[in-house]
Amino acid sequence: METSTTALLVLGLIGSFAFALSGALAAVRAELDLFGVAVVAAATGLAGGILRDVLLGLRPTALRDWRFVAVVVAAAAVVILVHPVLERSRRAMELAEAAGLGFVCVAGTVDAFDHHSGPVEAVMLGALTGIGGGVVRDLLLGEAPVVLRRGFYAVPALIGALIYSCAQEVGAGGLVAAIVAVGVCVGLRLLGISKDINLPRAGPRWPDQSEP
Amino acid sequence: METSTTALLVLGLIGSFAFALSGALAAVRAELDLFGVAVVAAATGLAGGILRDVLLGLRPTALRDWRFVAVVVAAAAVVILVHPVLERSRRAMELAEAAGLGFVCVAGTVDAFDHHSGPVEAVMLGALTGIGGGVVRDLLLGEAPVVLRRGFYAVPALIGALIYSCAQEVGAGGLVAAIVAVGVCVGLRLLGISKDINLPRAGPRWPDQSEP
Amino acid sequence: METSTTALLVLGLIGSFAFALSGALAAVRAELDLFGVAVVAAATGLAGGILRDVLLGLRPTALRDWRFVAVVVAAAAVVILVHPVLERSRRAMELAEAAGLGFVCVAGTVDAFDHHSGPVEAVMLGALTGIGGGVVRDLLLGEAPVVLRRGFYAVPALIGALIYSCAQEVGAGGLVAAIVAVGVCVGLRLLGISKDINLPRAGPRWPDQSEP
């Protein structure tokens, strides 16, 4: 319990920071003002953890612990200060998003087990909270959530959550299992981006039935 | 209590399956990949029940009980396998959406009474969770929630929730009342579609004041 | 406690009414039908309070207390009846939105303290629930949330929440502090609109990297 509490805090803080970076970069690209950047960074960074705690029946740690507020504000500040020298913003955002996905998704899985979830709930909760940050970011920026469209996003989240759940079920949960699960999830996501992996679609192009 | 627990599970599972079908069909139409179809199906199918449990202060059954996960995965699989032979996809989606609306909305009403709600909360909760599935589906696909625009959607949900609430208040709650309420809600929704019922708008076309 | 309970109810009811007006006006502008107007009014008016209660681990008062349902229905009815004679709808909507922001944001802060929050959580919760109403309204109408784009929205919410939190920390919480915090928040928001205050953006126009 002690181990997983520490693991959870570290995972959560890194995940919040990474997602907040991705949110801030997207907000700068969308030409929001400084405060809009900070708000989108905070919402993207904290959404996963807040959702997780609400679904576990807890009051969200991300609102209570000043360290979470501090990391998302720091992420917004970093992006506002350094973004002009970032040459390849899309790459930076993809890295931040992949890291956020991995850390938040494994944090959700760890936290679910800490609160007496079975493995089904732990996997669902981990994947859901991992995906949540990117969905919130896209909705706040008025875009269709890209995480459901582009190749390979939910699969790495599910695999990361599954790896930790399996480890936990065989009694090997803890910080090491969490690091492995995060690494596999982030690695798969980045591989999916660099190889442009796309899952097949459900069939031939849907017959044209335009909305009336 | 025993009756309504069984009724609730059955209503919830059917509602989740129907909404998941509607989500999967919409995702296939939007040309998402296979996994995107599964994710939208799961989100659409489970959103109503998760929202209901969160608003009742409970940990969501839809994440804990493998049967809910199984029905949404099954719905996604059915759509992926058979959609090419569905000749009239819009009709299929409308049917699935109407069924989801009816079952989820009455399930929300039943569950609220099981958790000591008064009739106002039960009706609000039933209608809200019934509408929730379609709203989540549309937001995830990057569309304006059609349920608030097209003719006749929230009214059947409110009427279904009202029917069950009245039955409950006169001591006639249970599976029979639930079936009647679902039937009326689904029937009204389908009638609204086939007759193209539209409620009146709030007045003459709003004077042109384009955003600056 | 007694004072803040009364203050909370009054703040919440006024905030819900004002946000519901803003939602109904936006829905009429978007040419929704009568019921769509009522649903958007209810969602916009109640979203902040529901979010607040969920984040505090409570069952939402806005669904349980018929007075909240009554005020949002009344707001929808007012808009439907009188909107043709409103000459300057945008101004009316701005006023309603500013009032909603102030009352809901301070209500969130008060309620957080009533439930043993520290000052960080109280400020976060106040600002989040204040912003929530406008975000829900815009998402339901299929628009990018304007509150993050246009000049000066989150800053007044944060300042209003900060003022009440400081008053509470020095033992001066209560109805008077709440009125001052609401007044400053609404005043800043309206000043921001009338002076067209915009915060600076994060730098020069982002180099053109169109999505592929």
Image (tube, coloured by chain):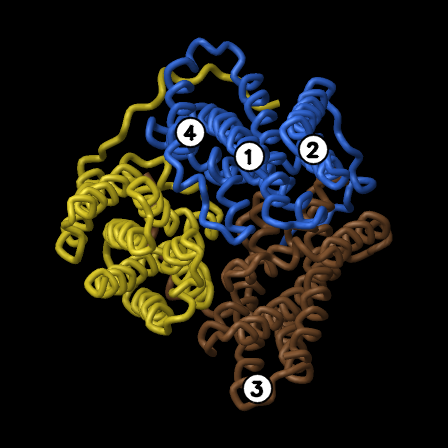
Chain colours: A blue, B brown, C yellow
Closest to the observer, C210 or A22: A22
Query: Mark 2 packing: few (<14 Cα in 10 Å), some, or many (20+)?
Result: many
4 and 3 marks in contact (CB < 8 Å): no
- Residue occupying image coordinates x 56% and y 29%: A100
The residues tagged by marks 4 and 1 sit, at their Cα atoms, a distance apart of 17 Å
Q: Looking at the rendered structure, which numbered label has been put on residue B167?
A: 3
Type of amino acid at the residue the image marks with label 1: Leu
Type of amino acid at the residue the image marks with label 3: Ala
In the image, which is nearer the foreground, mark 3 or mark 1? Answer: 1
Horizontal and vertical percent position of residue B148: 51, 60
Q: Residues at marks 1 and 2, common chain? A: yes
The residues tagged by marks 2 and 4 sit, at their Cα atoms, a distance apart of 24 Å
Among the 4 quarters of the image, the one containing residue C163? top left
Q: Residues at marks 2 and 3, common chain? A: no
1 and 2 marks in contact (CB < 8 Å): no
In the displayed structure, A132 sits above or below C40; it is above
Horizontal and vertical percent position of residue B111: 58, 71
Closest to the observer, B191 or A54: A54
Label 3: chain letter: B
Type of amino acid at the residue the image marks with label 2: Gly
Query: Mark 3 packing: few (<14 Cα in 10 Å), some, or many (20+)?
Result: some
Label 2: chain letter: A
Horizontal and vertical percent position of residue C195: 18, 36
Left of C181 or right of it: where is A128?
Answer: right
Residue B108 appears in view:
yes
Circle 3 sits in a helix, a strand or a loop, which is it?
helix
Among the 4 quarters of the image, the one containing residue B108? bottom right
| Disc 4 target residue | A72
Q: Looking at the rendered structure, which numbered label has been put on residue A160?
A: 2
Q: Residues at marks 2 and 4, common chain? A: yes
